[in-house]
Image (spheres, helix red, strand yellow):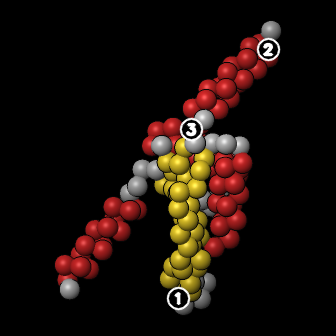
Amino acid sequence: MEEITEGVNNMNIAESQKKNRIQVSNTKKPLFFYVNLAKRYMQQHNEVELSALGMAIATVVTVAEILKNNGFAVEKKIMTSTVDMKDESRGRPIQKAKIEIVLGKTEKFDELMAAAAEERDNGEGEDQS
């Protein structure tokens, strides 16, 4: 039984160190910060895992939908769960909703990124003249 517990603990450590995971907050950064960060992660790792707790879930869903609707990403997996946490003010345990959305690159991802980069480069050229 101890081996199973140790295996689960090691798995949790490995999961928390995923290089392609973005933990989204609904207060710290603007929405498009996460959209652009997710694009960058998909360029590097071919997929990205968006994760959020509680009120930030709406932000994660919005980021995922923007990426899907603009043709950058396809949904690979959606996981929901609850997490036990301590209420900071009262010190009692509370449960928070958690969502994890795994997105992968679409076939035209690289093409869209190249077009966006070209558009940006052309736009910068016009500003300088």
Give the amino acid type for the residue marked by disc 3 in the picture.
Glu
x, y percentage for residue 101? 56, 61
Residue at left offset 59%, top offset 50%: 74
Task: Name the residue at the front extreme.
Answer: 107
Q: Tell me the distance, in whole angstroms, between the alpha carbons under discs 2 and 1.
A: 56 Å
Residue at left offset 66%, top offset 49%: 68
Label 3 belongs to which residue?
107
Residue 105, above or below 98: above
Residue 51 visible in the current orientation: no
Give the amino acid type for the residue marked by disc 1 in the picture.
Pro
Label 2 belongs to which residue?
126
Circle 2 residues within 10 Å: few <14, some 14–19, many ≥20:
few
Does label 3 or label 2 sit earlier along the sequence?
Answer: 3
Q: Secondary structure at mark 3?
A: loop
**Which is in the foreground here, disc 1 or disc 3?**
3
Give the amino acid type for the residue marked by disc 2 in the picture.
Glu
Q: Secondary structure at mark 1?
A: strand
Numbered badge on residue 93: 1
Quarter of the picture holding the N terminus: bottom left
Residue 9, above or below 115: below
x, y percentage for residue 84? 50, 82
Does label 2 or label 1 sit earlier along the sequence?
Answer: 1
**Which is in the foreground here, disc 2 or disc 1?**
2
Quarter of the picture holding the C terminus: top right
